[in-house]
Amino acid sequence: MTLRVAMWSGPRNLSTALMRSFEHRADCTVVDEPLYAAYLAATGLDHPGRDEVIASQSTDWEALVRELTAGPVPTPVQYQKHMTHHVLPDLDQGALAGLRHAFLVRDPERVLTSYAKVREEPTLEDLGLPQQLALFERFGGPVVDAADVLRDPRGTLTALCAALGLAFDEAMLSWPAGPRDTDGVWAPHWYAGVEASTGFATSSPGGHDPLPERLAPLLERCRPFYDALAPHRLRPATDQES
């Protein structure tokens, strides 16, 4: 049986680095944001590289879900990197029940500070926080915080693997720099930092920059969703041993 891990994250949450980490396991293949084209086609939003994204993926939601839940996988583990805002209100979330769900969260102040460098006026819908909480309430699953991954990669990934029924693999802590064939065609717009990396940095984009004042009201709208998920986050294995 293939373990199909659906990792649900908002943008600028360390999600691509975590995908790199799982891709470096010998028993795992990865899928990068498989619902992105369907999301853009349905919403008409003008994201960077929009036309390329839509040309690169199917926009048929039902076909995509069949592939994600039952399609062939060449490895014992498949890691699906999902953006929560790609799950639109009219999509049947119940069709995703066969996946093993997990959730990556990050302090929304850091998310907004980083995301505003790519899209100057983000919205709550861009960040997908309501959808992330709704998915967690429906499916449950382990929650990891990007801050814990950066502070203690080995301990946090050990705890995450255990929650998923996997053994921790030391290979998850480092990877060669550069792009991957598995990266989406949107990588040139979003992945520069990850492409330059060889492992988890001690800080992430936006980690020390001040929040633009204009985004303070949006931050207050974001906090309740993060605060609802944060108490469920896994403690790094090293914390549990201390």
Image: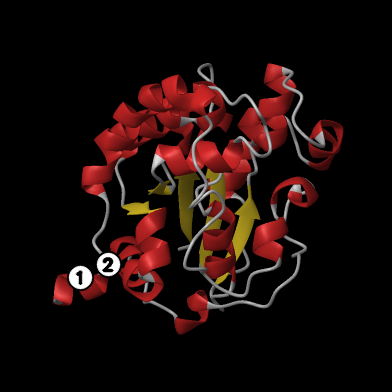
Vertical side of 86 occupied by 232: above or below: below
Vertical side of 239 occupied by 123: above or below: above
Q: Residue at x 55, y 78 (%)?
A: 174
Q: Residue at x 66, y 29 (%)?
A: 120
Category of crowding for the residue at label 2, using alpha-carbon neighbours closer than 10 angstroms: few (below 14), some (14–19), many (at least 20): many
Which corner quadrant of the image does residue 26 belong to?
Answer: bottom right
Residue 216 in sight from this viewpoint? yes
Quadrant occupied by the N terminus:
bottom left
Residue 72 in sight from this viewpoint? no
Number of marks drawn: 2
- The outermost residue toward the left is 242
Residue 109: where, in percent of width, then height? 43, 38
Does the CB distance between marks 2 and 1 fall below 8 Å?
yes
Q: Residue at x 36, y 28 (%)?
A: 134
SS at badge 1: helix
Q: Nearer the viewer, residue 99 or 172?
A: 172
Residue 104: where, in percent of width, then height? 42, 49
Q: Amino acid at mark 1?
A: Asp
- The outermost residue toward the bottom is 170
**Residue 180 vs residue 233: left or right?**
right
SS at badge 2: loop
**Residue 5 vs residue 11: left or right?**
left
Which mark is on residue 220?
Answer: none
Q: Amino acid at mark 2?
A: Pro
Mark 2, residue position: 236
Residue 219: where, in percent of width, then height? 42, 28
Vertical side of 75 occupied by 94: above or below: above
Q: Residue at x 71, y 26 (%)?
A: 40
Q: Nearer the viewer, residue 203 or 37?
A: 203
**Residue 179 vs residue 20: left or right?**
right
- Between the residue at mark 2 and the residue at mark 1, the CA separation in whole angstroms equals 5 Å
Mark 1, residue position: 239
